[in-house]
Amino acid sequence: MAKRPARAVRKGTGRKLDVSKYSKLLKPTQRLRRLTIIWTNSSGNPYNTSGFFATVSTTSGRLIQTARFDGFGVVVFSRVSTPTTRDLIVRTYSSNGTLYTVTTVPEDNAAYVIIS
């Protein structure tokens, strides 16, 4: 994951922006439309999950979808709209089918992070 560059500290006076001019442009309207799962280690760094996959199912056991992780620890379930309306169970598997984690995602979520 890319690191953010250090902020330059400037001595003296800087130019200030009038924020009221930009208030219409800076509205937080971006939303995740599909359930997104991110798999990280305890430090918060995502795993290289190339070839890994995950399943999402209801708490009663009905399978909703299986999807592949990308190389950055992220999987998006295209059949699960957000915010979710019920608790869901997410199971993560390696490329050879070994079960790694079973996690319950509570309702009213658009994204969820698995830390293991």
Image: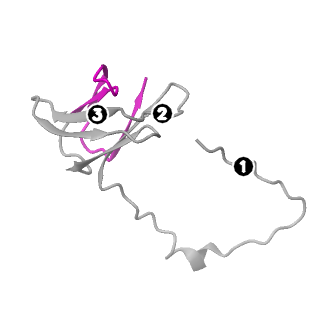
- Which residue corresponds to the image point at 48% horizontal and 33% vertical from the top-left? 48
Q: CA distance from mark 2 to mark 1?
A: 23 Å
Q: In the picture, residue 33 is in which quadrant?
A: bottom left
Range of the magenta residues?
89-116
Nearest to N terminus: mark 2 or mark 3: 2
Residue count near mark 1 (Cα–Cα under 10 Å), binned few <14, some 14–19, many ≥20: few
Q: Amino acid at mark 1?
A: Pro
- In the rendering, at what x and y percent does residue 87 appear? 20, 36
- In the rendering, at what x and y percent does residue 72 appear? 47, 40
**Residue topped by disc 2:** 48
Q: In the picture, residue 102 is in which quadrant?
A: top left
Q: Amino acid at mark 3?
A: Ala
* SS category of the residue bearing label 3: strand
**Residue topped by disc 3:** 54
Q: CA distance from mark 2 to mark 3?
A: 14 Å
The C terminus sits in image quarter: top left
Q: Relative to the observer, which residue lies in front, 108 or 101?
A: 101
* SS category of the residue bearing label 2: loop
- Which residue corresponds to the image point at 82% horizontal and 68% vertical from the top-left? 14
Per the rendering, the mark at residue 93 is none
- Which residue corresponds to the image point at 74% horizontal and 71% vertical from the top-left? 16
* SS category of the residue bearing label 1: loop
The N terminus sits in image quarter: top right
Residue count near mark 2 (Cα–Cα under 10 Å), binned few <14, some 14–19, many ≥20: some
Q: Relative to the observer, which residue lies in front, 19 or 105?
A: 105
- In the rendering, at what x and y percent does residue 29 appear? 40, 65
Q: Of the residues tagged 2 and 1, which is closer to the observer?
A: 2
